[in-house]
Amino acid sequence: MAELATIARPYAEALFKACAANPQAALTWLEELANVAGHDQLQQFADSPKASNEQVYAVVTGVVKSALDSHAQNFLRTVIANGRLSCLPEIAAQYRALANALSGSSDAVVFSAFPIEGAALADTAKVLEKRFGRKLNVSVKLQPELIGGIRVVVGDEVLDTSVKARLEQMKVALTA
C-alpha cells in the first residue's frame, strides 16, 4: 500500500490551490474535519460495506461543530467517495505546511512539565521567534517527565532546555 503522505499530498495541494484566496479559513475547517476523521469508531463505520457515502457524510457533518462552506462540503464528499477519510489528518498536516510556507511561518510545539498560558506563552513565543529567526505558531503540550524547563520542536529542529535533558547530559559526562 502507498505511503499515507503520498496519498494525502495531491489532496492537500489541490485544496490549497482551490482555497488560495483564504488558506487560513480552509485550514480551520480542515483541521476540524481531521480531528473528527481521526476517531476509530468513525473509521470503522466508514469502512463498513453497509455504510453508504451519504451516511458517512451525514455522520461527519453532524459531528462537526462549525458550518462547512461549499469548498469544505465538496472536499469532504470527494474524500469520502474515494475512500480516503482516514487520510484526512495527514492531508490537514500537509495543507498546514503549505499555508505556513506561504505565510513564512512554522509550527512550534513546546513540551513543558507545567502549563504555559497567557503572558508567559507570549513571552516564550517572542523569545523562540528570535531564536529560530521566523514567525512561529506555538502550541503547548504537557510532558511531566521533563521535570522542568521546556523542549521545543520546530520542524526538524529541537531545542531542549529541560531538566531531564540536563540530567542525561550529566549522566553521560559522569559515565564517560
Image (tube, rainbow, N blue to C red):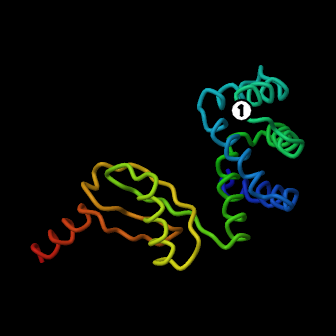
Q: Locate the C terminus by quadrant.
A: bottom left
Please say if 46 is above or below 101.
above
Q: Nearer the viewer, residue 46 or 26?
A: 26
Residue 117 locus on image (x, y percent) = 44, 51
In the rendered view, does 139 fall on the left or right side of 92? left
Count of marks placed on residues: 1
Residue 123 locus on image (x, y percent) = 44, 65
Look at 73% across and 47% down and name the residue there: 30
Kind of element beneath mark 1: loop
Q: Nearer the viewer, residue 91 or 97?
A: 97
Q: Nearer the viewer, residue 106 or 50?
A: 106
Dot 1, how many residues are within 10 Å of its Cα: few (below 14), some (14-19), or many (20+)?
A: some
Residue 112 locus on image (x, y percent) = 36, 55
Please say if 138 is above or below 101.
above
Instruction: Tell which residue pokes out farthest to the front in this image.
Output: 119
In the rendered view, does 107 fall on the left or right side of 101? left
The amino acid at mark 1 is: Val
When asked about the image quadrant of residue 53, the answer is: top right
Instruction: Tell which residue pokes out farthest to the left in this image.
Output: 174
When asked about the image quadrant of residue 6, the answer is: bottom right
Please say if 18 is above or below 85.
below
Look at 77% across and 39% down and name the residue there: 83
Residue 65 locus on image (x, y percent) = 70, 32
Please say if 15 is above or below 44.
below
Give the residue number, with chain letter if any, for mark 1: 64
In the rendered view, does 61 fall on the left or right side of 168? right
Look at 72% across and 58% down and name the residue there: 95
Look at 70% across and 28% down and name the residue there: 63
